[in-house]
Image: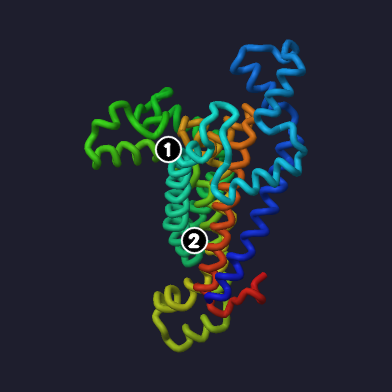
Amino acid sequence: MKDYILKRLLLVIPTLFGITLITFMVIQLAPGSPVESRMSLDQGIKSDQVTKEIVEQTKKLYGLDKPVHQRYFIWLRQIVTLDFGNSYRDHRPVIDKIAERLPITLILNVLSIFLVYLIAIPIGAWSAVKQWSFAERATTFVLFLLYSIPSFWMAVVLIYFFGGGGSFDIFPIYGVHSRGYEDLPFFERTLDFLWHLILPVFCLTYASLASLSRYQKGSLLEVLREDYIRTARAKGLAPNRVLFKHALRNSLIPIVTIIASILPAMIGGSVIIETIFSIPGIGRLGFESVLSRDYPVIMAVATISALLTLIGILISDITYAVVDPRIGFERKS
């Protein structure tokens, strides 16, 4: 197990290097200049009025006068010490801006993943046991309906019906804290924070919940058809013992690997949800940075998002090996 984990950790390094290289090149090829964007926004100067000398001086100030490959290796050398540089937009250290926003995004995604697995696995197992029943068909219909609804549309509907848009004013729809949050006791501050997260977490959870429960159902049905399950039943073992001790664990093998795809999907989806609900998370920071051509922040957000995705894949691989110890690094596909 130790050798397996070490090999998976070593694979993270070249993968992260490749992701950052491709991201850096794509950003450089994107239309628009951070120099002209910043000067026109902050100084109120139209781009056709900016002299060539001022543009060149600003490029030199930001280090944009160097070739692309040199800028990449300078940036790569800096991130080894967690120095992502300063933002072009407000000149604040990028690492400080990330440190302020990353915890909120992590809380959103961790809560969503926890709820997805907590609810989807029992629903999937129940659907497999109750296959073809009316309740199972109704549940399947609801799950497919949820899966087909875009998260941004669901967010708007929830805001309208439960955020005071037109019906009930139950949940807050802006930020993660209420006014006067600092003066509340610790317990009330925690409740206020969680109350603000209900609608965003639901929007991040329901689609993955629908798909994962279907995966769990299909995996369990496949396991229940195996010869060793029929043998266990023929020996007279109780149905619950056959289901929970022999079938359920083996059906989890493909389910735990899906976390490798759920995590990046949620991080990508959090950009939309954080923007709609005005949540100061890393997704919203990345979106604002793209609009302002803030290259250091864009690269930092992309790198951290890629690292979180690779950590999710690593956790998936390790969990895969724990669930089924027969799986080794060389044999895993």
Q: Is residue 132 left or right of residue 13?
A: left
Mark 1 is surrounded, within 10 Å at the Cα level, by few (under 14), some (14 to 19) or many (20 or more) other residues, namely many
Mark on residue 124? 2
Residue 274 x, y percent position in the rendering = 50, 35
Mark 2 is surrounded, within 10 Å at the Cα level, by few (under 14), some (14 to 19) or many (20 or more) other residues, namely many
Mark on residue 100? none
Q: Is residue 219 visible?
A: no
Q: Is residue 71 visible?
A: yes
Taking the view exactly as shown, the residue that stands out farthest to the bottom is 235
Q: Which of 180 and 83 is in front in this view?
A: 83
Residue 98 x, y percent position in the rendering = 50, 40
Q: Is residue 71 left or right of residue 10?
A: right
* Snapshot quadrant of residue 27: top right
Quarter the C terminus occupies = bottom right
Residue 60 x, y percent position in the rendering = 70, 29
Point out the tag, 1 or 2, that comes first from the N-terminus: 2
Say what amino acid the circle numbered 1 marks: Leu
Q: Residue at 48% x, 56% y: name it.
A: 134
Residue at numbered disc 1? 199
Q: Residue at 68% x, 33% y: name it.
A: 63
Task: Establish if 32 lies above or below 71.
Answer: above
Q: Residue at 69% x, 12% y: name it.
A: 46
Q: Residue at 71% x, 18% y: name it.
A: 54
Say what amino acid the circle numbered 2 marks: Gly
